[in-house]
Structures are given as structure tokens and as C-alpha cells.
Image: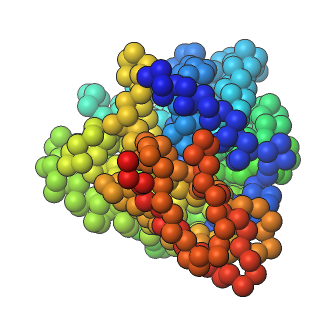
Amino acid sequence: MCLFQLFAVGLLCSFSDCCLTRSESFDVRDHFIQDNAGRTRVFRGFNAVQKGAPWFPSHLLNDSQLDFYQAWGFNAVRLGVMWSGLEPIEGHINASYIKVMQNIVSKLGERGMFVILDMHQDVLSSAFQTYDGIPLWLLEKLPPSPHQFPWPLAPFPQSSWALGYLTQATGRAFQGIYNNEAGTLDCFVKFWEIVVTHFRSFENVLGYELINEPWAGDIFTDPSLLLPAEAGRRNLQPFYDILSRAIRALDNEKLIFYEPVTWGVFLNGQYSGTGFTSVPGGSKQQSKSVLSYHYYCWLLNSPATNSGGLTRDFCDQVLGRAVFRTVQEEVKNLGGGIFLTEFGLCEPDGDPASEGTRECEFVLQQADDNLQSWTYWDSKFFNSNGDPRLEVVRPFSRPYPVAVAGKPMSMSFVIDTGRFNFTFLCDPTINAATEIFIPKLHYPHGITVNVTPPRVAWKFDPARSFLKVEPCARDVIMATLIVSPRAR
């Protein structure tokens, strides 16, 4: 523990120096997030959402844990900015909450970690058996549902909070916000105006995520909204356009992250896709927009359907691969970028054959294959004593190109052998290095590197855990690096 802490502290001026500058800004080109040097950026990290008072994740104030996150190569946090913490009473802004959240963002920035500010909710409200993702005062503005919660699920099944979405009261509440009943959408706009005003000056704020896992709307009045594309076209896109315009009136630089309904990424099609015809705010905002999506093997969380390996195999071979294909197809039409902002229902345990280890590794490999950035949901990286659970951390602390002077073409990592392959198209007009994170968890004795073509210059800094590839000469079109562990 103590030795690892010393190692982590030693990285404080390494990861951050490499990957965060005072003038950092980002755009989206060719569906990749790029920095102001023109380099493609890749993000790896976790979610941090406190679903109740005090509404901020206190572990992100723990410097020791933050140092570990940095040492493991995490450079992104999807941070829940909770409306009930920000504005517990209508019109009364909690300045103390904002100050704590700003402190968290600053601490992350000191360690080279970027932040997605996420308006997080699940089934909207404690009135619907979850937590107050929106403040109760907002819900109370809306007209009451013809049938009270939990109709038609009476009694409400306590086994799954997500079933609350299938109640009329929840659907009517979402629809009321989309329709701006009683000015509730205006309140939503004001929430984002407050957030943007207080966080737009932070260089390490990557962007704003408009809402987590939005529901389709009032599916009892209009069952066609269960078709994900219908929900996207008719409810979410107009909603997002309004929020985007409000944000852009205050901040034209940060990225906007936006989600379809959760089942809108299973398949493409007229009725089965996201339903979006443009990014929030219209096609002119493509360079500042990122499609946020989630992947879970939902069946693994259902005792009724969980049959061990067969369930996982169905997810991995059918559902999971379909999701990664679908989002790629969606952004071909929409423009903008892609970011896997949640995945989970899996936890590695050090046993390569266990369900949790295999499922997480599948998603991580798919993200590598598809050159995707990600933030993991479960994130139980420490035990109750605050010590790292390295068997959980190890699959997530993996080599990856943090910044690429060109276009990534392929990436793979074999966790059993430590072999990492990365190929990218060189852009000789970019006068900045390609930076690859090399975790000590997988390379404790150093690395061997094979580069094609051999004249591509590189240097490994073991103290900083970074492999630096110098800008390519003009006659070098493509470069491939193969990294392997050095023998003891």
C-alpha cells in the first residue's frame, strides 16, 4: 500500500503535465474528439454519482484515491451534477454545493483528468421509488397523473427500480417536462444555465451531458413512443435543441453529450434507431456534439433469465456487438463523436473465467476494437478500508493512446500476455507527440517496443508511465507500435 502510494504521488506532475494544458479545447472531427493541437484524444475513466444528500461524491475529495486514479491512467470522470443538490428549493442556489463540486473538478484537473458534467437521474424522483434526480418542487409543478404511481404495476416490484419507468406517473412526468407544462422545461434550462455559468471556465471540463438515460415519455397515451426512434424524433430532439441553444448562448467551447433512450442503440432503422435527424442545435454543432450511449448485459442482472455462460454469450455475440455497430452507423448520419459513458453489471475478481471478469473484458475489448472512449459505471476500486482492489483495477488500467498525432486505425490489448498493438495514420502537420499510457500494473519491469517503420522515433519514460512517439516525417504514412512486457 505505502509503496504504491509513493508511486502514485510520483505521477502527479506527469500525467497532468502531458495531457492537460491551460489552453486546452476540443472539437470533434471524423467522429473523434481532437485537441487544439489537432491530436485525436482517447478517454478512459469512471462515473461518480451521489444519488442522495449531500449529492456530491465525497471520495473525489480524497487526495490519496485521486492519486491512485491518476496512476492507473484514468483521465476522465463522468461527474453527476445533481439538481436536488444545486437547487433544493426553487430559485435558491446552493452556493456551498457549487463550491464543493468546483473543488472536485479542480482536484481532477490537477491530475490531468477531464470531467463530463452529467445531469443524472433514474426514474426522475423519490416519488417513483428511486431518488430525486429532479427536485421534488419541480415534480410538484406538474399536473397529477390520472393513475397514481405505481399503476399499472401494483404492488410495485421492489426487485428492480427500473420498472418504475413502466408506470404512468413516470411517463407523464417526463412528457410534462418535454412539453414544458407549468414551465418545467424552462426550469430545466435554468438549471443548465447555472451549471454552465459556474463551470465553463474550468479547462478540464470536457462537456455537458444533458440528461442521463431519458425516458420515452407518456407511453400510455401514445404507445408508439416505445419505438425508440419515435421517442427520439418527437420528444428528445426538440428537448435537446432547446437545452443546446441555452448552453450555446453562454458557452460555445465545451462539448455537448446527448443520449437516446437506452434501447435506441440496439439496432438501426426507421423505428429502431435513435431517431435523431441532427445533433442538438443542428448540423452546425456537429464539431461540438458527442453521442453518449450505455451498454449493459441486462440479462445478467435478472435472476429469471440468468443462465450463466449462455446469457453472457448471447449478450457478447449478439447484443453487445449490435450496440457497437449501431452507434457507429448513427454518427455516420448525424456527425459528431461517440462516447461509451456507462457500462457495467460486471466486476472483475482476478479469476479470468468468472462471469464478471469475462463480461467486463468483452466490453473493454470491444471498446478497443472500435476505438471508443469509455467511463465505467460500477467503479468499486477500493475496499472498505480504502485500499485498492487491484484484481478489480487491473483490467481497466490498460495501455491506450491518450493523444494521437493522426488518426487511430486499430488497437488491441491481450491482458494475459500484456501485448499491446496500436496503429495510426500519421499527420505530419501536427507538431505534437503521440502519447501512450503504459500501466505499471501490466509492465512492472518495463517494456519492449517494436515500431514499424523503424525510423519512427519514440521514447519511454518509466517514471511517467508514458511512451512518447515523435511527430512522423512527411514520408511516413502509417505507424504501428507493438508493446510487450520486459522479462524480469
Along the viewing direction, whichever of 423 and 79 lies nearer the viewer: 423
Q: Position of residue 46 (x, y in %)?
A: 51, 40
Q: Position of residue 119 (x, y in %)?
A: 61, 37
Whether residue 324 appears in this view of the structure is no
* Residue extending furthest toward the front: 488
Q: Is residue 342 left or right of residue 88?
A: left
Which colour style is shown? Answer: rainbow
Rendered view: 257 above or below 74:
below
Q: Quadrant of the N terminus?
A: top left
Identified at 36% across, 66% down, the residue is: 321
Q: Position of residue 56 (x, y in %)?
A: 59, 22
Identified at 59% across, 79% down, the residue is: 453
Residue 226 figure quarter: bottom left
* Residue extending furthest toward the bottom: 475
Identified at 57% across, 46% down, the residue is: 462
Along the viewing direction, whichever of 179 and 425 lies nearer the viewer: 425
Q: Is residue 72 left or right of residue 138?
A: left
* Residue extending furthest toward the left: 307
Q: Is residue 372 left or right of residue 322?
A: right
Whether residue 406 appears in this view of the structure is yes
Along the viewing direction, whichever of 311 and 304 lies nearer the viewer: 311
Identified at 62% across, 35% down, the residue is: 11
Q: Is residue 348 left or right of residue 39?
A: left
Residue 322 figure quarter: bottom left
Rendered view: 476 above or below 444:
below
The number of discs equals 0
Along the viewing direction, whichever of 102 and 358 lies nearer the viewer: 358
Q: Position of residue 347 (x, y in %)?
A: 32, 39
